[in-house]
Amino acid sequence: MSAATTTPAGVSAKGPGMRARIGDFTSRHRSTSVIIGMAIVAAVLPLIVVVPPFSAFQTQNAWVDGFTNAGVFVLLALGLNIVVGLAGLLDLGYAAFFAIGAYTYAYGASPFTGLEIPFWPMLLVGAIVAAIFGILLGAPTLRLRGDYLAIVTLGFGEIVPIVFLNSDQLTNGTNGIGGIFKPSIFGFTFTLTNPWPFYIVMVGLVTLTMIFIYRLQDSRIGRSWEAIREDELAAASSGINTVTAKLLAFALGASTAGLAGVFNAAKLTLVSPDQFLFVVSFTVLAMVVLGGMGNIWGVAVGAFVIYTIQSVVLKTLNQFFDTTGIPILKDIDFIQFQFVLYGVALVLMMLLRPEGLFPSSRRKRELHARPDEFEGEMPDEAGEIAESVP
């Protein structure tokens, strides 16, 4: 390439080598930002809940336990964001991979099988097993797009819980697998009465996952996903291997769900088919859409806020109106209306802010820019994506 490029420091340079060095610097900077940001969030959240009005809702330990449960959905939303937000592949059966990760740990560390494999290697095993099933789902659906892909993934998401439900000898059926062994480290065993160890582990898992996804987003495969999301035919014409890219998106998204499944099973010490119904897939998809598809921090914040509203705010509203005795409102179970609230929120978001609460810059430009604003700009972006992938 003959044209000179300019580094962030203003130094003129030539060739793709300098661009690669700039990319490495940016990735390191983002990783540091994620670590610092997550450390601040992890330290501030337990402190905020000890001051009014949050302290009136529930105890600090209950808040910390809720934050840990929210972290499970943050992991799920981050994984689904790879498939939906980055690669543009609509997946409505995402809870199936969540179930596969949970049952993998249940098989590896419970009296049901008699195995006592430690929790830490099972995190990796659960992610790998879920990734394999992600590839098995993605391989026969490579030619499908849009609604057809959504229908196939929806079917997969319905099949998996039904298989676990009816395989009594393999999964204990409706009773599920209980007595799952809790994590331990250096002789210290996690307990259900102390939520802090689970909270710390969840913060670490979310941090590592976000760093990994940011690295992927800035890599060649990340740009390939962006190109496929914008126009798969044009991406294939530019030399992008769409088969490999789509399979990798399915695998990595599924592996993140498997990771969340292993952690959730270890925390609850029980897995059963009713934990992985379609409502989980819908909830996670709503988190991704409301948070801002394609924006990693946006998706994480959206998932955290929505889960907190669902698990704390709605329950608090029930308690508040029961205490005050306000007519009509005291008879309403707000938790039962959570999906009505989801529906209203989605309709309002699509009308007022379709890019989500914290959108990626590219998606925000696409949804709000005038057509003439892209004249002369798209060829440069398309050329950049084509040059960055083999």
Image: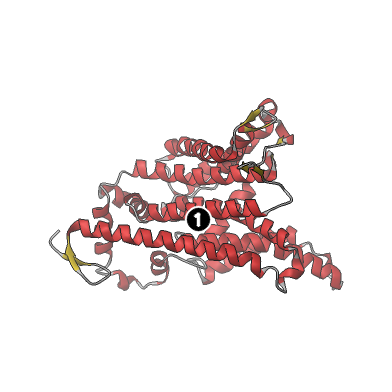
Q: Viewed as shown, does residue 342 lie left or right of 134?
A: right
245 is higher (above) or lower (below) than 371: above
Residue positioned 30% across, 50% down in the render: 235
Q: How many marks?
A: 1
The percent coordinates of residue 363 (x first, y second) are: 41, 64
| Dot 1 amino acid type | Thr
- Considering every residue shown, the one lying at the far front of the view is 186
Residue positioned 35% across, 56% down in the render: 218
The percent coordinates of residue 191 (x first, y second) are: 71, 46
Residue positioned 42% across, 36% down in the render: 139
Give the labeled residue for mark 1: 207
Q: Quick one: quadrant of the N terminus? A: bottom left
283 is higher (above) or lower (below) than 313: above
The percent coordinates of residue 177 (x first, y second) are: 70, 35
**271 vs 374, nearest the viewer:** 271
Residue 301 seen: yes
- Considering every residue shown, the one lying at the far left of the view is 2
Please rate how many residues cluster around mark 1, counting C-alpha atoms within 10 Å: few if below 14, some from 14 to 19, many from 20.
some
170 is higher (above) or lower (below) than 89: above
**294 vs 333, nearest the viewer:** 294
